[in-house]
Structure formats: C-alpha cells, structure tokens
C-alpha cells in the first residue's frame, strides 16, 4: 500500500473483507465488507449502472453480446420513434421557418427583414401548410415598410417545397 494513502478501510484480496490502514501502516483490525458499500472502501453505495455492470460481467460472453445488442436495439427504436414524433410535432414551426426563408428571398433587402408573429394552418386533404404573417424590411429606397405575406409549403424529405408566396402591403 502506498504510504500516501489516507487512513481508512480498504478491501482485502478475498473481496469479502476489509482491513484498516492508519495512514502509515496496516493495523490488526479487519471486518467483513459491508454489502451496501462500493468496492474500494467507504466510497458509498453501488450506483444502479455499477450493479448492471457487475451483473453483466457474470454472464457468459454470448449472453453479454445478446444483452448488449438488445439494449442497443431498444435505444435505437426509442430514438427513432421519438424523432418521428418530435418531427411531426415540430412540422408547423418548420413550415414557418421555411416560409420566412422563401419570403426573404423575395425582398429587396433580405438582411433587413424583421418577421412578426406568423400563423400556420394545415390545409384540408393534404400536407400543405398555409403560413400568414408580416415582415418589415427596407424597400428599394431604403424606407422600412411592412408587408403581409401568405406562403404555402409542402413537406418534402427533411425540407419544404414552396407552392406559392404572395405579398400584400
């Protein structure tokens, strides 16, 4: 034992008991290793992850591989399901973002665009989103003007396809 180690109870090689180190030498004191303490002395209870690792180590290697593969499949399935749910839930927000991009493309000074609140509705009988809102931007003379816009987009892959965009002052 390194003489720099702090005093405390340390495990014995048998794994079932501990001896006391007083900071300079081993004492004659020993005790059974408490069931609720982690390996390495009095560091606290095993965490659930540590218990799973201990259980996993006790399995034959083929069973370890099967357990690991099963856990990976469960995590991937949960991720894929949550991503699909998250994506459909966020689709109206993404439609607004797409329309703001298309509207900016039609402005004289897109870098000056300041978008107001927008509303979105899904058109009946299809995947088309109709977005209406306002945008303040500079016109060709440098004056700030407000335009109302209506944009219709349809989801395609990870993006949106522009159907129409119209402006009304």
Image: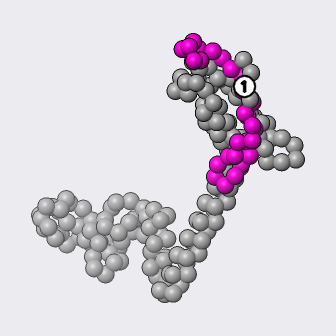
Q: Is residue 152 magenta?
A: yes
* Closer-to-camera residue (74/109): 109
* Closer-to-camera residue (16/48): 48
Q: Quadrant of residue 100?
A: top right
Above or below — where is 112 with respect to 70?
above
Please say whether residue 100 is visible from this viewpoint: no
Q: Which region is colored magenta?
A: 139-165
* Closer-to-camera residue (133/70): 133
Q: Position of residue 54 (x, y in %)?
A: 45, 74
Left-right relation of 16 to 122: left
Split into 4 quadrants, where in the image is the N terminus? bottom left
Split into 4 quadrants, where in the image is the C terminus? top right
Give me the residue at 64% from left, 61% from top: 80
- Say which residue label 1 marks: 167
Please say whether residue 65 is visible from this viewpoint: yes
Dominant secondary structure of the residues highlighted in magenta in the image: strand
Above or below — where is 98 with respect to 21?
above
Give me the residue at 49% from left, 71% from top: 52
Residue lying farthest front? 140
**Circle 1: is it few (<14), some (14-19), or many (20+) Cα within 10 Å?**
some
Q: Is residue 24 magenta?
A: no
Give me the residue at 20% from left, 60% from top: 7
């Amino acid at each position: 034992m390194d003489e720099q180690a702090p005093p405390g109870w340390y495990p014995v090689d048998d794994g079932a008991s501990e001896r006391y180190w007083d900071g300079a030498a081993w004492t004659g004191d020993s005790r059974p290793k408490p069931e609720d303490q982690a390996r390495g002395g009095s560091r606290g209870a095993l965490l659930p992850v540590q218990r799973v690792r201990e259980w996993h180590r006790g399995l034959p290697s083929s069973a370890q591989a099967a357990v690991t593969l099963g856990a990976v499949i469960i995590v991937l399935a949960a991720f894929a399901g949550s991503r699909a749910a998250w994506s459909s839930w966020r689709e109206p927000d993404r439609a607004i973002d797409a329309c703001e991009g298309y509207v900016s493309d039609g402005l004289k000074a897109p870098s000056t665009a300041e978008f107001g609140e927008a509303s979105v509705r899904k058109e009946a009988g299809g995947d088309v989103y109709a977005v209406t809102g306002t945008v303040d931007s500079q016109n060709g003379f440098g004056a700030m003007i407000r335009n109302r816009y209506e944009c219709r987009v349809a989801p395609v892959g990870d993006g949106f396809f522009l159907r129409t965009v119209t402006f009304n002052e």
